[in-house]
Image: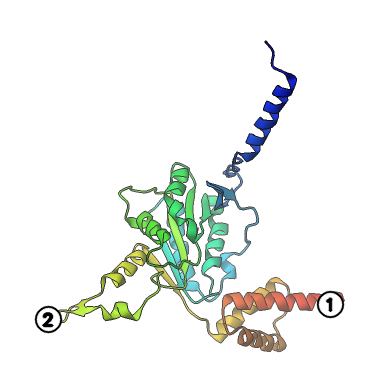
């Protein structure tokens, strides 16, 4: 006995409606061409999104942080060549090149198999899942966490702490974590915690448990790199470098304008120097073309 035509059509429409309600399958990461990835969410799904518009910044572009650049480059070179290397915590003043350094490292070592996965702070709870996805791949992965800052009861804080050095699982030797933060210990510090510190009869200092807990997270990073506010001369050198990439000469007028720019921004940093150079070069080219 055949079914009525209208009943079949109703079933087809129902099937189409159900299909529209089902979550779409997220795109697979492009392991062949992709050099950087971002951990994304879509409803209940988590997936690696291939980043196409990569920054072109090079290590040579980063001025005034030679020691930090040398240390992290050495650590990364060890890592991509299969030798022992440490997780890295970059802390300090804003705009001093912490994030740019990670981007430059990718450009330096991508041809050697380095890949970077950017993970937002709120998604750090997914770190074990990310590691499982890439654990058996031949590439070397840096999981990059930018501008970290936690509260003590933050689930992401606990997840990062565990994946760094607290899990029973041995982890994967093709994964490191590089994180940037304005705070050395990644958590806010309060005066009451210092008041809880005690001194025993022998004069030995015993930090409070809250202080110890905060220090224990940063201690899990084997390499600490600190970034500081820049001197005027270094700031001007950086502005001069970026202007040279636009083929703009660095004159006395340019020097004065660069210093005024930093004064107006309240910051002498690599970021403000690069922003000044972009503004100055753009205005110069606009005047030349008008």
Mark 2 and mark 1: span between their CA atoms?
A: 75 Å
Residue extending furthest toward the left? 201
Disc marking residue 37: none
- Quarter of the rendering containing residue 252: bottom right
Q: Residue placed at 64% from the left, 75% from the top? A: 274
On the rendered structure, is 153 left or right of 244?
A: left
Q: How is the image coloured?
A: rainbow
Disc marking residue 288: 1
Foreground disc of the pair 2, 1: 2
Q: Quick one: label 2 or label 1, which is nearer the N terminus?
A: 2
Task: Report the residue marked by disc 2.
Answer: 201
Element at label 2? loop
Q: Residue 92, position in %: x, y?
A: 46, 75
Q: Nearer the viewer, residue 143 or 119?
A: 119
Q: Quadrant of the C terminus?
A: bottom right
Q: Callout 1 environment at 10 Å: few (<14), some (14 to 19), or many (20+)?
A: few
Q: Nearer the viewer, residue 202 or 178?
A: 202
Q: Residue placed at 30% from the left, 72% from the top? A: 211
Q: Callout 2 environment at 10 Å: few (<14), some (14 to 19), or many (20+)?
A: few
């Amino acid at each position: 006995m055949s079914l009525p035509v209208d009943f079949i059509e109703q079933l087809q429409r129902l099937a189409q409606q159900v299909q529209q309600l089902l979550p779409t399958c997220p795109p697979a990461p492009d392991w062949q061409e992709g050099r950087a990835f971002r951990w994304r969410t879509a409803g209940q799904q988590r997936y690696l999104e291939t980043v196409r518009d990569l920054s072109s910044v090079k290590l040579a572009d980063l001025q005034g942080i030679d020691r930090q650049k040398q240390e992290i480059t050495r650590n990364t070179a060890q890592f991509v060549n299969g030798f022992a290397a440490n997780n890295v915590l970059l802390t300090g003043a804003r705009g001093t090149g912490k994030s740019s350094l990670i981007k430059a490292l990718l450009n330096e070592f991508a041809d050697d198999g380095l890949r970077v996965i950017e993970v937002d702070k709120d998604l750090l709870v997914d770190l074990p899942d990310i590691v499982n996805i890439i654990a058996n791949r031949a590439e070397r992965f840096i999981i990059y966490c930018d501008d970290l800052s936690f509260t003590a009861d933050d689930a992401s804080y606990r997840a990062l702490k565990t994946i760094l050095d607290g899990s029973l699982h041995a982890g994967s030797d093709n994964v490191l974590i590089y994180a940037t933060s304005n705070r050395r210990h990644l958590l806010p510090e309060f005066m009451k915690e210092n008041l809880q510190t005690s001194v025993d009869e022998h004069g030995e200092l015993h930090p409070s448990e809250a202080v110890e807990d905060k220090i224990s997270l940063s201690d899990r990073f084997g390499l600490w790199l600190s970034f500081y506010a820049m001197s005027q001369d270094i700031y001007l050198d950086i502005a001069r470098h970026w202007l040279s990439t636009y083929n703009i000469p660095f004159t006395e007028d340019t020097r004065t304008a660069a210093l005024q720019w930093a004064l107006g921004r309240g910051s002498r940093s690599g970021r403000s120097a690069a922003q000044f150079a972009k503004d100055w070069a753009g205005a110069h080219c606009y005047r030349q073309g008008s």
